[in-house]
Amino acid sequence: MGQPDRHQAIEEKSTRSLLSVWEVVELARHANRPYSLDFLQRWAPDFVELHGDRLTGDDPALVAGVGTWHGRTVMFMGHQKGRSLADRVSRNWGMMHPEGYRKALRLARQAAKFGFPIVTLIDTPGAYPGASAEERGIASAIGTAIQEWFQIPVPVVCAVIGEGGSGGALGLAVADRVLMLENAIYSVASPESAASIVWRDNSLKVEAAEQLQITSRDLIAMGVVEEIVPEPGGAAHSNHDATAQVLGEAIWRNLEPLLKQRPGDLLQHRYERFRYIDSLVTAHPQFGPKVEPRLVS
Amino acid sequence: MPAPAPRVLREVPAAGGKLPSIAIGTNCPSCGVGLIARELQKQVYVCHCGHHFRLHAEAWLALLADAGTWQERWADIRGHDLLEWRLPKSYQQTIDQALQQGLNESVRTGTAKLAGHPLWLSVFDFRFVGGTLSIVAGERLARGLEQAAQSGLPYLLVTASGGARMQEGVLALMQMAKVNAAVGRLHQAGVPYFVLLTDPTFGGVSASLALLGDVNLAEPSAAIGFTGARVIKQATYADLPEGFQSAAFQLRSGQVDQVVPRTELRSRLARLLDLYSHAGRS
């Protein structure tokens, strides 16, 4: 916004895959990019939002609830950014507090109770980096969520729709399949944070973004995501309807075969998906011989 | 059936073996008293005023393991620079230099005995790129956790880390899921998991396996949190209160079970190992 010419130029380049890494970051953060609710309203018009972690509060940075999709009840959850300033403030820019991760787990367990498959949408710069989150145990809330997702015996498909930042994203991204919109990013830390950590200077965000390898093409090459979903017209913000259409099709195509898997197999495959996700590095000769795990099932 | 033998509190020395010497200044940074290296070594690097000096991996192993019982596993695995990281210097150079200095990655893992109890023991080493969680570290942790789940030996983790290793990108982030999946299996197998949080424990380590212990202990001097104070101030312009993210703060916030001085640590762990090895399972 405020730079229409620049954004138009980026869109044109995007259709030809000529974007710089930083231009992809700008698209992932574009103020008109479709957010979780833009997708949920289109996929499941009967969506009912469910609030609260049943412990201390509700986190507006996470929208979650149930809706009918392809003839069955599905549990949806996703980071939610706001579009107006007031909305952005109330959604805390999509940065979750501990209550968000606890709400996600409560509803994941509920989905398991009813056998609802789960779709999660990732769009966060990271978990909230503030004192209120620390005081209420943000670290253990994320750690517990990551651990518990491995024990939710229903299919989970995740899509990174905008920013996938750090542990704040991963707390919602332990899934059987992870997809990425073409111009989404997924990173160990936001480029600003990484620059601040490595160089103590967050103005080096562009260099950090390039080093970190955070675009969908990087992620699929590393074997961290299963599929890239092309953005219609080169940029998701230019057409919310068409983007919801192609992303919905891709998620369902990945979800449907999982519905037939036995819960035990599903959890074993989810375990192995993350246990060997770094095989590009661990299969290298200098890493040494692979140790066959003796797993307790 | 004979009544089970009553359990008695045992005398457990503060250290299982002789600690290596650690570089310390001439004066204690807390109380200013002049330090005598040999005395401090005997006091497991705790000043009379209570200041706890940071220990590295070898020192933790010497302190915790009964002398001669430490058997390291998977010490030979080596990562490489997948992202071709160049700035401010090449990542390959960073890890090669650390290896040349005799450091072997940010996590060391293996088996040992503590006051006679066999266990799995993993220690972070803050000297290796800030103790950051890397692929090698994650692999050592996951393998040990899987084997502990299989064998039923308790697992003790000592943390000291700035978080995930930036230079390994999103694959470092994925280590959080990899190790937490393995911790989940350890819990499901009914195996005790104890964590000792030392200074500092942050980011991708505090938000993965560090706070998932059946019992979380913290050293009195440990700063523990998700986001470091410097970044919180930068992001929110907040004034942080004295003692924010201290071990006492995390005890109050419900994140740790006990704050234990290093001089009492080993006997506390021995008692926990006694108590939890008599769990309901056969």
Image: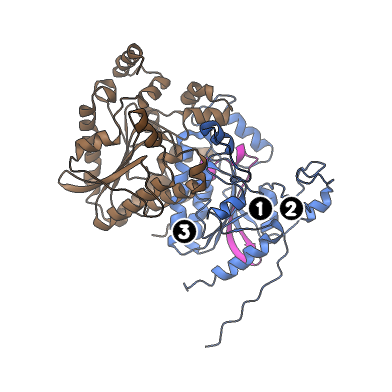
Chain colours: A brown, B blue
Looking at the image, is B63 positioned above or below residue B280? above
State the SS at label 1: loop
Is A228 magenta? The answer is no
**Chain letter, disc 1 residue:** B
Q: Nearer the viewer, residue A168 or B119?
A: A168
Mark sitting on residue B220: 1
Mark 3 nearby-residue class (10 Å; few <14, some 14–19, many ≥20): many
| Residue B76 % position (x, y) | 58, 44
Q: Nearer the viewer, residue B259 or B205?
A: B259
Disc number lying in front (3 or 2): 2
| Residue B203 % position (x, y) | 53, 41
Q: Which residues make up the magenta segment?
A: B112-139
Question: Residue at the spot x=17%, y=48% of the render?
Answer: A72
State the SS at label 2: loop
Q: Nearer the viewer, residue B216 or B140?
A: B216
Whichever of callouts 3 and 1 sits on the residue coming sooner in the sequence is: 3
Residue ranking furthest to the front: A86
Alpha carbon of mark 2 to alpha carbon of mark 1: how far? 9 Å
Alpha carbon of mark 3 to alpha carbon of mark 2: how far? 35 Å
Mark sitting on residue B50: 2
Is residue A94 visible in the rendered image? The answer is no
Residue type, numbered disc 3 = Leu
Residue ranking furthest to the bottom: B1
Cβ atoms under marks 2 and 1 closer than 8 Å: yes
Q: Are marks 3 and 2 on the same chain?
A: yes
Left or right: residue B7 versus residue B279 is right
Q: Are marks 3 and 1 on the same chain?
A: yes
Looking at the image, is A181 positioned above or below residue B123? above
